[in-house]
Image: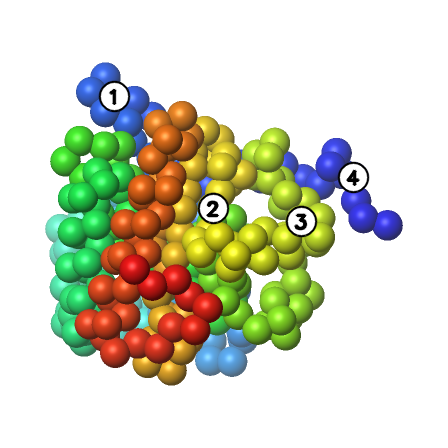
Amino acid sequence: MSPSRDDIPKRSSRAELHHDGTHWLLAPQASERVVKQPPGLVPALENAVAILQFLNDTPPHEAALVDLTAALDISKTHCHSILKTLVHFEWLKFDPRSKTYRLHSGLLSTASSLLNSPVLDAVRRSLSALVQRIDIPCLLTQPMDDDTFIVIDKFNGPKSMEISFPIGHRFPRDACAQMRAYLGWQTPERLDLWMEHWTPARYTSKTPLDAKSIRASVVATRERGYALSQGEFTEGIMAIALPIFDRDGQVSFIFNCSFMIDSFLPEQEKVAAEMIRAATEIHRATLARPPESFPIL
């Protein structure tokens, strides 16, 4: 027997809409933090990753040895050795006056090939041009092995609502528009595997909570040519999303345009067409191989 709607825990929306008197801002909830659990294979490496994640995610983004040992349950000696190693490789910077550690630019140097790949350059060019045409903000995310989605970049227009999700923000695997865009052109077997690990989560009053509805939304995405979410993940927000494929025909990124429902609805078909145009440009520029059923403009 499927659980009733009242039996399913209410998860807070993954974003909040604010107005500062001049424009709208869509931002993640301050308390939101999705952490991937360590596999327990190499404890020292897992602790180093935990330290980097903590400093990146926790304001004021610097911490003393005692703060890190308490927050992460790492012994003082072990934690100090990891910190010294990270400082040596310039992934962390130590302030001798305050006795605190913070992230250092050596991290960017190590990851420079990822941040500046030719494929990402092509994606950024097309998405920047897209946002200039439609004046609706766009998020670029990457599907991860656990089916969650990590923010790679964001693009805000000159006038529209601003999105402020930080690079590295992790969306859950059932973030409606992104999930549908990812699964829309997958094989039936891949959808079945995804469903095996799906647990109903009620983000808003409109979130679908049964397997039949989830499957139907994926089928509708393929038939429509783009993924759509109307207030199902964040109250009052409509989103359209599309996948970006690589040369092997696998989904490498998802791009997602979001705006307030009342303003977005009249522009839905126009925005979707412009997004398909952007996806077509990206696939041609990167020699990607989208499925034959994927829309082209």
**Could you tell whether 140 is left or right of 229 in the image?**
left
How many labels were placed on the picture? Answer: 4
Under mark 2, the amino acid is Leu
| Marks 2 and 1, the one that precedes in the sequence | 1
| Marks 2 and 4, the one that precedes in the sequence | 4
Nearest the camera: 166 or 96? 166
Label pair 2/4, CB-CB below 8 angstroms: no
Q: CA distance from mark 2 to mark 4?
A: 25 Å
Please identify, in this view, whether the residue under mark 2 or under mark 4 is nearer the observer: 2
Give the number of the disc on residue 4. Answer: 4
Nearest the camera: 230 or 200? 230
Q: CA distance from mark 3 to mark 1?
A: 37 Å
| Marks 4 and 3, the one that precedes in the sequence | 4
Residue for badge 1: 20
Element type at marker 1? loop
Report the residue at 64% width, 43% height from top: 208
Q: CA distance from mark 4 to mark 3?
A: 14 Å
